[in-house]
Image: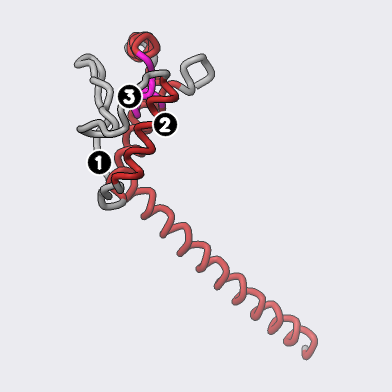
Amino acid sequence: MSHDFREQAALFVVGALDEGEREAFVEHLSTCAECAAEVAVQGEVTSAMAEALPPQTPSPQLRERILSAAARQSGVVAHARVAGPALAPAPQRPDVRTPSRSIGPWLAMAASMAVAVALGAYALSLRSRVGVLEAQLESATADA
């Protein structure tokens, strides 16, 4: 992506755009296949990261600190002991395709990496064999 929406794809996926930015990006997505593909990839990465570890419940002190910091950052004065989830996802518009939560691309990447490592090890093995054969050839040539 070489246009102004490059950095907004990841922010859109995690729901970090404000309403105006979000609406502009959604409108842009309807005409830009490159950004739509980036949103799909970012969504898969985000989903895989979210599913990679089991969910953890933060301590009440950590939750209180996070909520207080978020309230200070947004300029809103809020009580630190707010009930409910710490972060609510941004609502998705029905006209935007939500990224799949498939781990298929991750499995394909892992398999590709395993094949690359195996081929590298095989290439090193062949290289050492060639070195031995060259030494034997030099020895045989000298004897002849």
Label 3 vs label 2: CA separation?
A: 10 Å
Residue drawn at 38 percent across, 24 percent down:
16
For disc 3, the marked residue is 78
Asked if the residue under mark 1 is in contact with the one under mark 3, i.e. CB atoms within 8 Å, the reply is no
- What is the secondary structure assignment of the residue under circle 3? loop
Q: Which residues are magenta?
A: 11-18
Q: Is residue 106 visible?
A: yes
**Residue 129: where, in percent of width, then height?**
59, 77
For disc 2, the marked residue is 69
Q: Amino acid at mark 2?
A: Ala
**Residue 89: where, in percent of width, then height?**
27, 27
Query: Compared with residue 134, is residue 26 higher up or lower down, i.e. above or below?
Result: above
Q: Is residue 104 visible?
A: no
Q: Is residue 16 magenta?
A: yes
Q: Amino acid at mark 3?
A: Ala
Mark 3 closeness class: few <14, some 14–19, many ≥20 residues within 10 Å: few
For disc 1, the marked residue is 102
